[in-house]
Amino acid sequence: MVTTEAAAYFSEELLHWYLANKRDLPWRMNRDPYRVWVSEIMLQQTRVDTVIPYYERFMAKFPTAAALAEAPEPEVLKCWEGLGYYSRARNLQAGAKEVVARHGGAVPDDRDAVAALRGVGPYTTGAIMSIAFNRPEPAVDGNVMRVLSRYFCLEEDIAKPSTRVGIEKLAASLIPEGAAGDFNQALMELGALVCTPKSPGCLTCPVMRHCEGRMAGKEHELPVKSKAKPPRRETRIAALVAGSGANAGKLLVRRRPDSGLLAQMWELPHVLAPEAPG
């Protein structure tokens, strides 16, 4: 049950904490929507400390959406090398081309237009709209679902789409007027630094006084998340073919298809191993 008092306390205290303690990160230098967009894509499934040097190099090389749109794809992928999940880079460049073609090279202050960009989902849309344009849009990722599940003692399965929708509505209702960007970043910051997955720092949390999950002794049990199906194991047989003559010192590799898992990446030739008889 979300009470008005707990909600008001949460929003006010969290915002005060963030403004006093926020980390000095390169994408917080200004609110340029392109810079925000690039940072949010890089931060998907990647730690902040890992992203920082990549982000700085990427922005130095591609400082605008137009610069990214015009760059050869191999150059973009080379700059991304080591971050993994290369589809993020391809989608980001495709989105930049859409921004140039449809919006004159500037990320628009329009939620639907931003949401329509390649590779931009609900979370990234909310992050761009709130951080860059200060629009009261929720930006709900795993960090935010964990924080709100604990604070309000929400025991619905966060793996269910209906739970996410409910948490998005809750997050939107908590945004203080005129402070959407700072508040959404505060939520992310709390989840990253204090309300962590396995060892929540309740004693250092700025909103612990009204945290219903802590008061119920469930801070280590929440959020509730059903387990995903275990990955399917495969055994593959790879060929290691070394060159001779003019190709001495070289290995035979092939490029993966343009779409699907690890698209366009290079690999050793391989085939699926036949299953052993049961």
Image: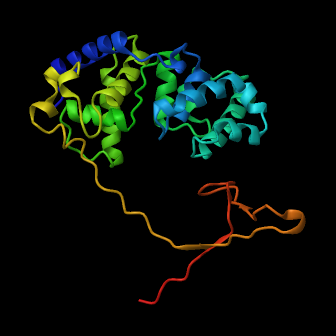
Query: Does residue 54 lie above or below 85 as drawn?
Result: above
Q: Let me know if residue 50 appears in the view.
A: yes
* Numbered disc total: 0
Residue 94 lies, with reference to residue 110, above or below; the image says below
Quadrant of the rendering where the C terminus is positioned: bottom left
Can you give x and y, in whole percent of width and height, for residue 160 in the image?
33, 49
Is residue 62 visible to the viewer in this orientation of the structure?
Answer: no
Q: Nearer the viewer, residue 26 or 5?
A: 26
Identify which residue, 253 or 211, lies in the foreground: 253
Q: Residue at x 57, y 73 (%)?
A: 236
In the image shown, does 34 or 274 lie closer to the viewer?
A: 274
Q: Which quadrant of the figure has residue 147?
A: top left
Which residue is drawn at the image coordinates 53% and 32% (left, top)?
A: 51
x, y percentage for residue 269? 69, 69
At a point 59% along the width and 17% down the height, the residue shown is 32
How did the renderer colour the structure? rainbow
Q: Quadrant of residue 76?
A: top right
Residue 184 shown left or right of residue 244 in the figure: left
Side of 86 where 185 appears, left or right? left
Q: Is residue 236 left or right of residue 198?
A: right
Left or right: where does residue 192 sit relative to residue 2? right
Task: Measuring from the top left, give residue 172's x and y in whole percent.
Answer: 35, 25
In depth, the one of 7 and 35 nearer the eye is 35
Task: Where is residue 31? Give x, y as percent.
Answer: 54, 15
Q: Looking at this rendering, what residue extends furthest in the bottom direction?
A: 277
* Quadrant (top left/top right/bottom left/bottom right) for the N terminus: top left
Q: Quadrant of residue 259?
A: bottom right
Against 23, residue 102 (above or below) is below
> At 72% across and 33% down in the image, what residue appears?
97
